[in-house]
Image: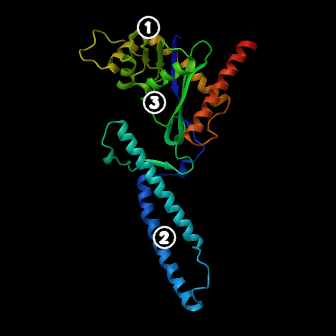
Amino acid sequence: MGRVALDGSKVKANASKHKAMSYERMQEQEKAVGEQVKEMLAQAEAVDAEEDERYGKEGAGEELPEELQRRETRLKRIREAKRALEERAREKAKKEGERVEKARPKAKDQYNFTDPESRIMKSSSEGFVQAYNPQIVVEPELQLIVGQAVTQAANDKEQVGPMMAAVEAQSGQRPEAVIADSGYCSEKNLETLEAEKPPERRIEAFIATERQKHGERRVAARGPLPKGATRVERMKRKLLTKAGAAIYATRKSIVEPVFGQIKEARGFRRFSLRGFEKVKAEWALVCATHNILKMYRVCYA
């Protein structure tokens, strides 16, 4: 397999962002609702005592008032959500090699009560939305999707390695080169590609190091690279060469139209299913449908 292009696009979850609550808000609500429950229980006990004295203990039923039940249910859900965010923080700390016992959620970390596995993400066109971050790798000849996945990460900084592995697993071939926009540029992503062993398995990267304004022209730098240049600095110099710029320019005609066909032409802008595993299956079906339509047009159009 030759060059491929990689891209991601936020797709709304089957959940409203208004059903999400931050960790800071959870702490406030836990305290407030807890106080309300205590107060209502005290009132209920006082009423029970009065009714027992008036009618005897064999009198009225023992069920909780409806409003008290509702608040206790709410308190239980808030506490479950808090524990879920705390567990996420511990998992993140473990992954990053930090001390798990000291890991705590950030005040603005969100939990969605409708689809807890979705995340608040910034969309390029709609601001912050409750979403997942589907990824595709596309080959240039027929615009077939040769690798696909869904991530809960709000950005693409760590997706190059996993997506190249997805291409190999799903298509049975390993790309020679990958083209991606600046959202994928990080020392870690570039290091992952360079560190591949044996060397013949290494995939050449053409990844933008910064967002380019429309119509902006870049001038190739002159002179040798400075000693100790980072991978990102070397990549920037590479894309300023005539050959590098020409290869990177093909990205727009390879992968961007595919997301346009899926989201605009076919109207897929929101997942129907909830939960990470079901969303991954739904996205795989969407990508398979895209490929079938492409092959149909090649064979019968």
Q: Earlier in the sequence, mark 3 or mark 1?
A: 3
Q: Residue furthest left?
A: 227
Disc sitting over residue 156 in the figure: 3
Q: Gap in Å between the C-alphas at discs 2 and 3?
A: 43 Å
Q: Residues within 10 Å of mark 2 (few under 14, many from 20)?
A: some
Disc sitting over residue 243 in the figure: 1
According to the picture, the residue beneath numbered tag 2 turns out to be 37
- In this figure, what is the number of numbered marks? 3
Q: Name the secondary structure under disc 2.
A: helix
Identify which amino acid the numbered label 2 is placed on: Val
Q: Name the secondary structure under disc 1.
A: helix
Q: Residue at x 58, y 77 (%)?
A: 62
Query: Which one is closest to the eye, mark 2 or mark 1?
Result: 2
Residue 108 visible from this viewpoint: no
Q: Residues within 10 Å of mark 3 (few under 14, many from 20)?
A: many
Residue 140 sits in quarter = top right
